[in-house]
Image (cartoon, helix red, strand yellow):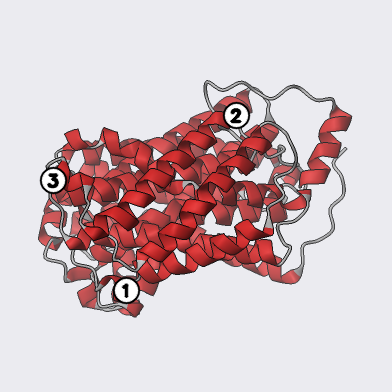
């Protein structure tokens, strides 16, 4: 029998209701996108951006004629992606309405299957459009285009795992995978909200804003959905216990790669000892961190090994990753330094899309570090009740190591050195968001062993302890 749940506080109900309303409204608004392309009208989302920011923000980029020509040439695929994607987003948001699956389980299943079909069609449309469009002509350029590839593939993977676990009647894991899917779809409206914020703060065009925001969208969306599922989603169906999806040795190796990348990018390269240039890939100062990043790098080099050790111990089930206060203090210091070093005024202003992406990735790394460290210092990450948040935050700290893992894959893509580094940072940031979310939700990734089966009593006690 499901345990009774007390009503949510009013402020949480208002936040959840407003988020659902905005998401559903944005999704329904996007369903009209194919019609606006066919008739040559301005899309509603672009009209709103022009109204909230400025017409120049939306239409002032010199690349706008190329984007419109690409959309006209691949009208079918972009229409399927945007139009059906809007329907998929709206239907997936409905699945997050508290109480729907208890009061109307048949409606929940029906809406779920329609949402699955719509999501798959939308991602297939995205892949078809990206396949037919040269990477340098995609909206936002190569870096943003590769980010779209990553988003489409990740969404197809998570929705497939959601269907598989539902067919297996593994409802708790099914809820986790659909939470991951919801987070990936949520990046679309979050990008538009971010466009408004960035456009109001700095004199940029919409493609510059997109490159600035793309590095942090997956992380922020994953945190938002994790907040929701812990507050409302698991009230009738408890989440699985959080656990590391990586084997213990992998955390140590990732931290070592992160140390090497940070030492190079923030210490060696600003002093002229650039190994990227030594390998024949010339990059400008706009694609490198300023000298002010050295203070952040020295602190981070102390943080990463300790972070990996704590994660390794958690993966070996040796405690509940209680965080040393000294680690939180160091993390807070490096997060603030990273924000200063990556800020547009600290870096001298953005000169290209690559620098905008790198700035966004470094800044979101610093911002999440600051927020997470403040929570640790205030005691909000103490005890087993916040195990999910601590685990996801620790994994986030290993982002530089994940970026380093991506670098060997990119020199054959025909990109310049700045774009290679920007894409590696983007893919690495997406990876830690993915693995952090999967770990926080206790999911089993394809090819990895499932945790040992537990009895109903022990499962309930573990869930209650960690939820």
Q: Residue at x 85, y 41 (%)?
A: 2
Left or right: residue 443 compared with residue 211: right
Image quadrant where residue 440 sits? top right
The image shows residue 235 at horizontal and vertical percentages of 77, 49
User: Which residue has dot 2 on it?
Assistant: 444
Q: Say whether disc 3 or disc 1 marks the residue closer to the N-terminus.
A: 3
For the residues marked 3 and 2, what is the alpha-carbon distance in whole angstroms?
41 Å
The image shows residue 387 at horizontal and vertical percentages of 70, 48
Q: Secondary structure at mark 1?
A: helix
Mark 3 nearby-residue class (10 Å; few <14, some 14–19, many ≥20): some
Q: Secondary structure at mark 3?
A: helix
Q: Say whether disc 1 or disc 2 marks the residue closer to the N-terminus.
A: 1
User: Which residue has dot 3 on it?
Assistant: 73
Q: Residue at x 68, y 52 (%)?
A: 323
Q: Is residue 269 above or below residue 427?
A: below
Q: Is residue 201 above or below residue 63?
A: below
User: Which residue has dot 1 on it?
Assistant: 346
């Amino acid at each position: 029998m499901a345990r009774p749940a007390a009503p949510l506080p009013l402020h949480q109900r208002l936040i959840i209701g407003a988020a659902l309303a905005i998401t559903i409204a944005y999704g329904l608004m996007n369903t009209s996108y194919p019609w606006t392309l066919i008739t040559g009208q301005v899309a509603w989302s672009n009209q709103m951006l022009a109204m909230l920011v400025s017409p120049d923000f939306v239409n002032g980029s010199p690349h706008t004629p190329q984007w419109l020509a690409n959309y006209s040439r691949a009208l079918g695929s972009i229409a399927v992606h945007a139009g059906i994607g809007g329907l998929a987003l709206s239907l997936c948001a409905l699945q997050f309405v508290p109480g729907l699956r208890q009061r109307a389980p048949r409606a929940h299943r029906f809406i779920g299957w329609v949402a699955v079909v719509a999501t798959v069609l939308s991602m297939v449309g995205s892949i078809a459009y990206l396949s037919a469009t040269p990477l340098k002509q995609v909206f936002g350029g190569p870096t943003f285009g590769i980010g779209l590839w990553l988003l489409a593939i990740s969404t197809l993977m998570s929705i497939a795992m959601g269907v598989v676990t539902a067919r297996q009647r593994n409802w708790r894991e099914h809820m986790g995978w659909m939470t991951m899917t919801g987070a990936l779809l949520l990046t679309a409206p979050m990008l538009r909200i971010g466009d408004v914020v960035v456009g109001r703060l700095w004199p940029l065009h919409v493609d510059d804003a997109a490159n600035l925001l793309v590095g942090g969208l997956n992380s922020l969306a994953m945190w938002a959905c994790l907040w929701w599922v812990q507050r409302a989603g698991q009230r009738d169906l408890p989440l699985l216990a959080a656990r590391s999806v990586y084997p213990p040795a992998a955390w140590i190796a990732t931290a070592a790669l992160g140390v090497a990348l940070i030492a190079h990018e923030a210490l060696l390269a600003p002093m002229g000892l650039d190994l990227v240039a030594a390998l024949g890939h010339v990059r400008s100062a706009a694609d490198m961190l300023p000298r002010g990043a050295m203070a952040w790098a020295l602190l981070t080099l102390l943080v990463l090994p300790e972070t990996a050790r704590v994660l390794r111990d958690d993966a070996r089930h040796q405690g509940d990753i209680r965080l040393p206060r000294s680690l939180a203090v160091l993390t807070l210091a490096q997060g603030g330094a990273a924000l200063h070093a990556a800020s547009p005024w600290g870096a001298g202003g953005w000169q290209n899309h690559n620098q905008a992406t790198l700035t966004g990735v470094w800044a979101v790394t610093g911002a999440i570090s600051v927020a997470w460290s403040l929570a640790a210092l205030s005691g909000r990450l103490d005890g087993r009740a916040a195990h999910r948040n601590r685990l996801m935050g620790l994994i986030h700290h290993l982002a530089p190591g994940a970026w380093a893992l991506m670098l060997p894959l990119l020199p054959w893509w025909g990109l310049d050195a700045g774009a290679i580094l920007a894409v590696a940072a983007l893919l690495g940031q997406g990876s830690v968001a993915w693995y952090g979310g999967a770990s926080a939700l206790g999911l089993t990734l394809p090819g990895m062993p499932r945790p040992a089966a537990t009895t109903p009593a022990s499962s309930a006690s573990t869930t209650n302890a960690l939820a």
